[in-house]
Image: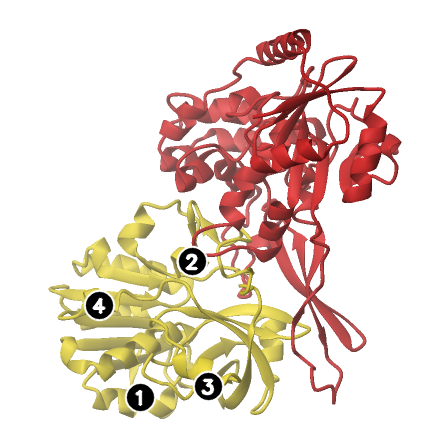
Chain colours: A yellow, B red
Amino acid sequence: MHAHNPYLPELATVKEVIQETHNIRTLRIVLDDEEKMRRFVFRPGQVGQLSVFGVGESTFVINSPPSCKEYLQFSVMRAGEVTQRIHQLSAGDPIGVRAPLGNGFCFEELKGKDILFVGGGIGMAPLRTLLLHMIDHRADYGDIMIIYGARSPQDLCYRYEFDKWREGKVDLVLTVDSEFPGWKGRVGFVPTVLTEEAPSPHNRVAIVCGPPIMIKFVLFNLKELGFQSDQILTTLEKRMKCGIGICGRCNIGTNYVCVDGPVFSVAQLQGMVPEL
Amino acid sequence: MSEIYIAKDKFPSVLGQLMGKCPVFGPVLQGKFHEFGRLERPEDVDLGYGNTRLSPKALFHPQAEKMFDFSLSKGDPEAGILKETPKDFRPRVILGIRPCDARAFQLDDRNFDTDSVRDPWWVRRRETTTLVGLACNTPGSTCFCTSVGTGPFDKTGLDVLMVDVGEGYLFQASTKKGEEFLAGLSAGEAVSGSVAEKADALKKGAEGSMGTQFSVDAIVQNPTLDLFNAAFWDEVQFSCINCGTCTFVCPTCWCFDIQDEVYQEKGSRIRLWDSCMFPLFTFHGSGHNPRSQKLQRVRQRFMHKLKYYPEKYKGGVACVGCGRCVRQCPVNIDIRHVARLMSASCVCPT
């Protein structure tokens, strides 16, 4: 009959909370049903709905890599009612999760290519899952460069694992908006640093995520560097409710970001109505 | 498919017997307006009505509906476990629904019941409901069903079509559910030639009175981005006050919100009708809003109905021409006018 109710969250438990920045926390959660946790599979870039019972649901990318079977990781920026309450959770607290949802990255098509990640602030979360997946399968990919920026050194997420990323033979370029005492990385906005680094577009795919204003100028500068629209991927944000393409609010024209996205190529976006 | 005739003087007793077998819903006069409601007595139903003020979509997709209940009580071993709210899924009959509104449910099915995901409540209610429709002998002045692929005598969305032929009703079954419904009725006479002729004449008269008011095909052929960027949206949106009435009365507006409500130590996850007319509909937690402007919201509504929907589902606009939004818009925005603008051969800004 109607055994599965797509609106019903799985029960899960918060295992660990990491304070990333003053307004971003990372939650590592485990499904209570051990069998389901073991069998849980997803693609890098897919999202999940986190539920705080009595408050509501919100959508976040699963930012752990598919190879990680111990927990699912979500990074949450405090912004509204649900995220406020998620920030109050600590290890041992219950949480609901509906996942995986959405399309994820077409990582199969990226094999053999050089990769450029461009991230800003919390926008590093969806890039992290793909980055770690690529490091897991390092031989499948060519050169990997990351340009990651935030307002200040304290606003960079995942600082504690940057060294590990570098061990995976990736070129990590960090930048902050202005000078800070003790900061040894680059200073300047992400689009500017991108132009200065000038990675070659030859056989390369750029994957971009960050605040809308950053994306706008990064896309412009990528084109200046010779990247074609089908060489650029981005993940989109929308207010979402059902997460399964029914409730009707996250559409861009005929596409629902929760089902047809959140990952789109710039070539796809150019054929869609400009309502980002 | 079978058909029967029931004289009007016998109809109340037939309806009474039907109501003894299962819940029956129909158009009921409430104050100044007709609304769909559960019939308590056979005389509650008013089959002389034009159409209801609200569409009957609430019978499948209530304006506010509990999805899950949960306890937040500390120490309760079941605290935080969402349990599906029990609902009444007994077989039921909706009597006297208009053909356009029944057709609308089929358009909505494409959203709620897909290959990849099925909305459990919508699907279950659709399965357990028999739709007995009432043909429109005299379509209203704001009706335009014949322009959008349905009609005053359209059986497509119905299990049974009823035609008021004066002294009685002609019942024509068009599905297996409809056949079963007719077989279960206690009375019913063979359909005489004169009744069949009269029904046919009524059908021709009703359809002939409407004509085609705009071309859906022309809208489908116009490129999406040309329509999106058309200059006429500025004129269309000018008087709109974003009240959302059009979306709430529309049988093919299904968008909803999901909210948790808590009272003391008990909570419910509920879903509520929402509207693309409201800025909050698309408002991000970050403060960004992809449809912050009224023009964007007005355009979304018409583009969804007349362009995105046919493009996504390959056919059929998400409008059945019931005319409710035309009648009830406080600033007289008329979807027929907008459809004509969208179907113009050139919509380029001049």
Tell me the residue that label 2 is attached to: A259
Q: Quadrant of the N terminus of chain A?
A: bottom right
Q: Earlier in the sequence, mark 4 or mark 2?
A: 4
Q: Chain of mark 3?
A: A
Residue A3's image quarter?
bottom right
Q: Earlier in the sequence, mark 1 or mark 3?
A: 3
- Tell us which disc is closer to us: 4 or 1: 4
Mark 4 residue crowding within 10 angstroms, few (<14) / some (14–19) / many (20+):
few
- Tell us which disc is closer to us: 3 or 4: 4
Q: Earlier in the sequence, mark 2 or mark 3?
A: 3
Measure the alpha-carbon separation of dots 4 and 2: 19 Å
Measure the alpha-carbon separation of dots 2 and 3: 29 Å
- Tell us which disc is closer to us: 2 or 1: 2
Amino acid type assigned to the residue bearing label 4 in the image = Glu
In the rendered view, does B142 fall on the left or right side of B27?
A: left
Amino acid type assigned to the residue bearing label 3 in the image = Glu
Tell me the residue that label 4 is attached to: A108
